Image: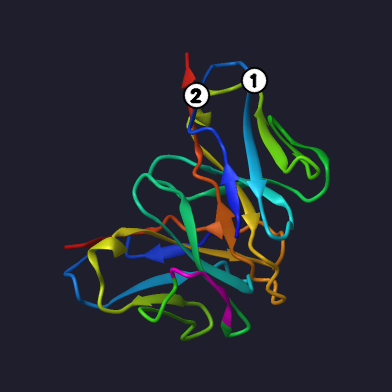
Amino acid sequence: GQSLEQPSEVTAVEGAIVQINCTYQTSGFYGLSWYQQHDGGAPTFLSYNALDGLEETGRFSSFLSRSDSYGYLLLQELQMKDSASYFCAVRDAYSGGGADGLTFGKGTHLIIQP
Amino acid sequence: EPEVTQTPSHQVTQMGQEVILRCVPISNHLYFYWYRQILGQKVEFLVSFYNNEISEKSEIFDDQFSVERPDGSNFTLKIRSTKLEDSAMYFCASSEEGGPQPQHFGDGTRLSIL
């Protein structure tokens, strides 16, 4: 089975940098994804790491260390609109058909203070 | 930008009744998914669908559930004999390709079982 651990809540100040960590245990590993979800909204894809290292997309970056079963999402120049829940997710065991469901962590609620 | 659309946005049903949740995936996408999110909890994978058949399903997706692609645009989730614990937000998602490709989520249907 798959399990992911991430902090339940993180608080940061507008304009600052925040890091949201995720550790995982999986029977097979096919990459770590990050999704953002505003209250009452749909999860929105942010980033994906299959290999070790840092992926940068604008103000958001995501890092993966496969040897440590660990990744993080880094948000820079925080804005009030970044207040949301952030979920790390792994693909379920490769089914062969390609339509692999995602196993999500419990999510980190990011609170941005002015 | 193309998006996944779900109807209805909110469905209220008596326990024991059947419900059908409807989704229109993004038109050129070939892989479809259903997830649910119980209030305050993480997003949970239910089922994936590709090439007119179920590709993968979780242990939540038991005989009470079924999916169908009745035509070239719709993708439905049917829940028979609903129970109180089926109350949740149900999200449909689609992806252009399988594997690590981003999954695009609809805004969800809030299902309330009375």
Q: Which chain is home to disc 1?
A: A
Q: Which amino acid does label 2 sit on?
A: Met
Which circle marks residue A46 in the picture? none
Say which residue label 1 marks: A17
* Residue B14 image offset from top left, x and y in percent: 16, 69
Instruction: Find out whether residue B87 is within the magenta segment.
Output: no
Q: What stretch is highlighted in magenta?
A: B54-60
- Answer with left or right where residue A29 lies relative to residue B18: right
Q: Can residue B68 be seen in this view?
A: yes
Q: Which chain is home to disc 2?
A: A
Q: Which amino acid does label 1 sit on?
A: Ile
Element class at badge 1: loop
- Do tag 1 and tag 2 residues touch (Cβ < 8 Å)? no
* Residue A28 image offset from top left, x and y in percent: 72, 60
Looking at the image, tell me whether mark 1 or mark 2 is earlier in sequence order: 1
Q: Can marks 1 and 2 be said to lie on one chain?
A: yes
- Answer with left or right where residue B15 lies relative to residue B93: left
Above or below residue A21? Residue A47 is below
Q: Which residue is drawn at 63% across and 63% down?
A: A92
Are there few (<14), some (14-19), or many (20+) residues within 10 Å of tag 2?
few
Element class at badge 2: helix
Q: Residue at x 42, y 77 (%)?
A: B62
Q: In which quarter of the image is residue B16?
A: bottom left
Say which residue label 2 marks: A80
Q: Can residue B48 be seen in this view?
A: no
Q: Nearer the viewer, mark 1 or mark 2?
A: 1
Above or below residue B46? Residue A96 is below
Above or below residue B27? Residue A7 is above
